Every structure is written in structure tokens, then in C-alpha cells.
Amino acid sequence: METRDRILDAAAELMRTRGILRTTTKEIAKAAGFSEATLYKHFRDKEELLLRVLRERMPGFARVEVTAGEGNLEDNVSRLIWGALEFYREAFPMLGSLLSEPQLMAAHRESISRYGAGPQHAVDRVAGYFRAERECGRIAAGTDPDAAAALLAGACFQQAFLRYFAHGLDAPPAPDALITGLTQTLMRALTSI
């Protein structure tokens, strides 16, 4: 396994079990079997490392590929919901501590904005997909793609939070019945005239 991958794997594990605030680059490097200097040869800072973990080691939004006009619309929406639920299930342990520290949240927000990243990007991507499906005629013309994406993300965020609250780090994946219920409810909203 390459150095970069070992560092990402160690970072993902430590951030998930300790949270982003309590995980240092020194600890990540040590867990990966390298010096902190080696870590910084591959990543500029802790924020870049976090973003790479979120993009490369996490299930979810950014990694679910759907193309407007292709495949079954309900299956595509279901896959997006599954991806969002999985992403939030994995992200809560990493990022939850930021919510309790307004100054650190502000610093984190500023840092990740330098990378053109942030939680809104995934929601914008889903809204773009819904907009393109509306242009293909597979979603009702009166549908607000931004609102539909916000509903999808918000419902998945809330459900993942409830599962994390109830089970902690060992929260199991969302049951199929939840994914089906969310999908069918959103489909009615997307396809009704």
C-alpha cells in the first residue's frame, strides 16, 4: 500500500473514532507508520487531509454517480438517498465536535472554503441532477430542484443523526424500509404535477 493511502486510512480511522478536533496530524502520521513530515509531503494541512478522507474514504453523496435521463429515476433517487444516509452516518463521529465549538467551526469553514469545499456542494450537485432530470421531462416542470435536494439532504441528515444518537459509532446502516419510504415519498413530490 502506498504512503498516501496508508495516511488516508489512518486519518479516516482516527477521525471517525476520536473526531476531527481531537485528532492531530502527528497522531495520524504515527498511526500510519510515518513521520509528520512525511504526512505533509502528501497533504498541505489537516483540512486537506479531512477533505481527502471525505472524498476518498467515505461512502456517499459525492461518490454516487447518477446521470439525468439514464436509468430508472426511482432507482437513481434511492441511490442518492442511500449515499446521503451512509455519508452522514460516517461523518457524524468525525465532524460532530465542530458543532460545539463556534470559533473552531468558523476556522474550519474558512479553511475548507480555500479548497472550494463544504457541505453545500453535495446538495448543489443533487439539485443540479434534479434540474437536469426536470429538463429531460422525468421530473414535474413545477418542481423546485433546490428545495427537493434540500429535502433529500435534510431528511437523510436527520435520520443519520437519530441513528448515531441511538447507537453511537456502531450505528448500523439505514434499513431498506427507511430508504424505500424516503424514496417513494420524494418521488411523489418530484413527479406530481
Image (cartoon, rainbow, N blue to C red):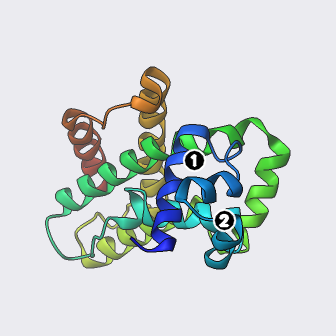
Dot 1: element: helix
Nearer to us of marks 2 and 1 is 2
Q: Amino acid at mark 1?
A: Met
Give residue 9's position: percent from left, percent from top: 46, 58
Q: Which residue is mark 2?
A: 35
Q: Which residue is mark 1?
A: 15
Q: Amino acid at mark 2?
A: Ser
Q: Quadrant of residue 51?
A: bottom right
- x, y percent for residue 130: 36, 67
Q: Please indicate whether residue 95 sits to the left or right of residue 128 in the image.
A: right
Q: Is residue 180 above or below residue 39?
A: above
Q: Secondary structure at mark 2?
A: loop
Lateral position of residue 26 relative to residue 102, left or right: left
Q: Position of residue 22 (x, y in %)?
A: 70, 42
Q: Residue at x 66, y 51 (%)?
A: 27
Residue 57 lies, in percent from the top left, at 43, 60
Determine the residue positioned at 68% across, 38% down: 97
